[in-house]
Amino acid sequence: MNMTDASLFDYREFTSDCDGPRLLITAGIHGDEYLPMLAVKELIDRFDTDAELRSSLRGSLTLIPIANQAAFERGNRCGADNIDLARVFPGTPNGNPTEQLACALSDQIRRADFFVDLHTGGTELCVFPMAGYTLHSDQSILEQQRQLAVAFGLPFVWGTSAELQGRSLSLARDCGVPAIYVEYLGAHRELAEAISGAAQSRTPDHPLVAGCLNVMRHLGILPEIAEPLPAACDVVEDERPGAGHMQAGPSAPATGFLVPAVELGQSIAKGDLLAEIVTATDRTKHQVLSQQSGRVLVIRDYPRINQGEAVAVVAESVKAE
Ligand SMILES: [Zn+2]
């Protein structure tokens, strides 16, 4: 069986006669993360229509705009089998539909020299714009990942434990492909941004489009251009198990309406108020306090929360050397 089953997802490959690395960029591993899909479609459009850009390419570029078509069609994080694609890598050719999809995507990751996986917080979470990577045990891969994450050009860079399993980056880690993931806001805020962006001209590039082009230039897939250095970003590396898990944070003590008390990206201290939860039945207020000092990386964006669900994620200020 050919594991690169094109019927499982659409992708475009742009190749050059000149030697260079093979870069894979994916969006839509989760079906409710829209802005990355638009960004990758925009990149496809540019390479299709701009002959000069195409002729300046070295190596190859594989672009997958909507990796999880079944989930996208449902407007949901997951497809009809309700399995999170980002928990079942490397998948299996004989498994359920999501495991088969993971298997086909894994084949693309194995073929790549570098891999960028684009995400957002989806319909429930909102994530401070950031690029992340695993703290790989191979120092050369770790350094390449660090450089890719910084080159992308978003304000926060987060290196976290390499222990998490089932992710696209877990497979990249296991087959030695330097890889980063990117998070950019969530469906509620990203959509407003995408619509207003579409109403304007193409300049300036959306940060996700610009970030992918920055990575291509960093890798020599596109020629360097003279432009101001990106603003310095905040780099945090945190080796503790569980760090980097977007759903791991202080959980809601009750089911109710969520009223955030912090802004995304804000620095807070341990014990500060993160949010209040107001129960729908008797309007009792429950406070959720931060268990760490650091920067608010994720807050739940959807106004209803169930008891036990994560309210926010705070990245502790552990500086990389
Ligand atoms: Zn995602």
Image (spheres, grey):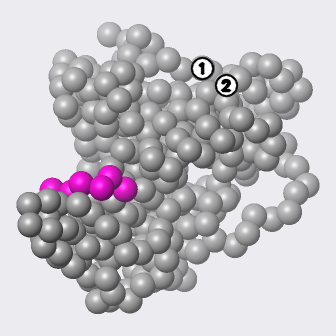
Magenta-drawn stretch, dominant element (helix, strand or loop): loop
Q: Residue at x 19, y 18 (%)?
A: 94
Q: In the displayed structure, does residue 27 sit left or right of residue 97?
A: right
- Picture quadrant of residue 30: top left
Q: Which residues are magenta?
A: 301-306
Q: Is mark 2 within 8 Å of ligand 1?
A: no
Horizontal side of residue 190 vs 318, given as left or right: right
Q: Amino acid at mark 2?
A: Ile
Local crowd size for mark 2, using a 10 Å CA cut-off: few (<14), some (14–19), many (≥20): many
Camera-nearest residue between 301 and 244 = 301
Kindly tell me whether residue 289 is visible in this rendering.
Answer: yes
The answer to whether the residue labelled 1 contacts the one labelled 2, judged by CB atoms less than 8 Å apart, is: yes
The image quadrant of residue 311 is: bottom left
**Which residue is painted at 45% across and 58% down in the image?**
127
Question: Is residue 302 rendered magenta in the image?
Answer: yes
Instruction: Where is residue 84? Give x, y as percent.
Output: 25, 38
Percent position (x, y) of residue 36? 54, 39
Residue at point 61%, 66% (across, down) = 155
Return the residue at label 1: 12
Q: Is residue 230 above or below residue 106?
A: below
Q: From what the image shows, is residue 65 above or below residue 169?
A: above
Read off the residue under disc 2.
Answer: 44
Q: Secondary structure at mark 1?
A: strand
